[in-house]
Amino acid sequence: MSHVHDALFFMVKNLYEEKKWREILKLNEFSNIPDANRILWVWPNEEDIRFIQDFIVRNGLKGVSSIGCGNGLLEWILQQATGLAVEGIEINEEWWKSRYAYPPFIDLKFPNFPLENPLNKDHALLFCYFNNGPAFTDYVKNYTGNGIIIIGPSYGNGKHTEPPPFNVKFPSLNWKLECYKEIKQTKDFIAFYIRSGEL
Ligand SMILES: C[S@@+](CC[C@H](N)C(=O)[O-])C[C@H]1O[C@@H](n2cnc3c(N)ncnc32)[C@H](O)[C@@H]1O
């Protein structure tokens, strides 16, 4: 337990076992803990979680398929807070099952590439701090549902993701920004896109 993030992980894990998701979010309420991103890249507050929930419900969706969910902590919090279905998709099964990785908070799915099974159209796709542009394109092409959530840094945050929350390179012109929200005062944004028109 020599590192800040190990101590933080230990606290998160205890609260997770007690199902205290609000307390987990409060651990990094001011998003100022060094290395907290080793556990989760963004630490939303409850308002942000409700904003995501509203988007999903408003668009007639039933849950979230989170692509590149990492250890799945955000997804577990979403599930606990909203009761919506969540699933987490990752690569590199060997790493996640190794003793070096933080154990995941939800079951992870490891698809074969090129993607064989279409993604669940009743779920919104979530990309939180995703970092793989070509894979983003593949996932969106395999998705016939109507909602995509992108969480990532905007200008002035100093970080970069692919896709970024704004000016996203979608594989078709049908995806339109519906609304967005800054996570606390982090210059990280949640952006919602909906499909308008035919597939
Ligand atoms: C910066 S991390 C973000 C993790 C988590 N979403 C978060 O916000 O804390 C990006 C994640 O995307 C995963 N990833 C990269 N390419 C992927 C792909 N083709 N399919 C699924 N996951 C992928 C990586 O393994 C990594 O865990």
Image (cartoon, rainbow, N blue to C red):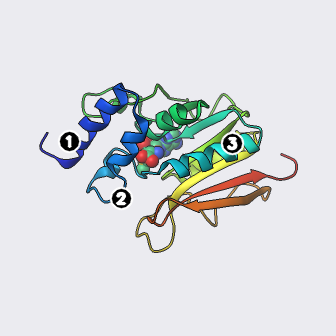
For the point 71% across and 60% down, the residue is 177
Q: Which tag, 3 or 2, sits closer to the chain's start?
A: 2
> For the residue with label 2, is its CB less than 8 Å from the closest atom of ligand 1?
no
In the rendered view, does 139 fall on the left or right side of 75?
Answer: right
Tell me the element at label 2. loop
Q: Is residue 54 or residue 115 the one in the foreground? A: 54
Q: Residue at x 55, y 30 (%)?
A: 111
Alpha carbons under labels 3 and 2: distance apart: 26 Å
Residue 12 position within the rendered picture, expressed as x and y whole percent measured from the top left: 31, 37
Q: Which disc number belongs to residue 7?
A: 1
Which image quadrant: the C terminus? top right
User: Few, some or many C-alpha atoms within 10 Å of disc 3 (few <14, some 14-19, many ≥20)?
Assistant: many
Which three-letter amino acid code belongs to the residue tagged 3? Ile
Label 1 Cα crowd, 10 Å radius (few <14 / some 14-19 / many 20+): few
As rendered, which of 111 and 36 lies closer to the eye? 36
Instruction: Write down the residue under mark 3.
Output: 56
Q: Amino acid at mark 2?
A: Phe
Q: Which image quadrant for residue 151?
A: bottom right
Cβ of disc 1 within 8 Å of ligand 1? Answer: no
- Hey, which residue is sitting farthest left in the picture? 2
Relative image position of residue 61 (x, y in whole percent) = 73, 37
Nearest to the eye among marks 2 and 1: give it.
2
The answer to whether residue 111 is above or below residue 188 is above
Comparing labels 3 and 2, the label whose residue is closer to the camera = 2
Asked if the residues shown at circle 3 and circle 1 are in contact, with their CB atoms under 8 angstroms apart, the answer is no
Q: Which kind of residue does numbered mark 1 sit on?
A: Ala
Disc marking residue 30: 2
Q: In the shown orientation, is residue 28 left or right of residue 79? A: left
Q: Residues within 10 Å of mark 2 (few under 14, many from 20)?
A: some
SS for dot 3: helix
The Cα–Cα distance between marks 3 and 1, rounded to whole angstroms, is 34 Å
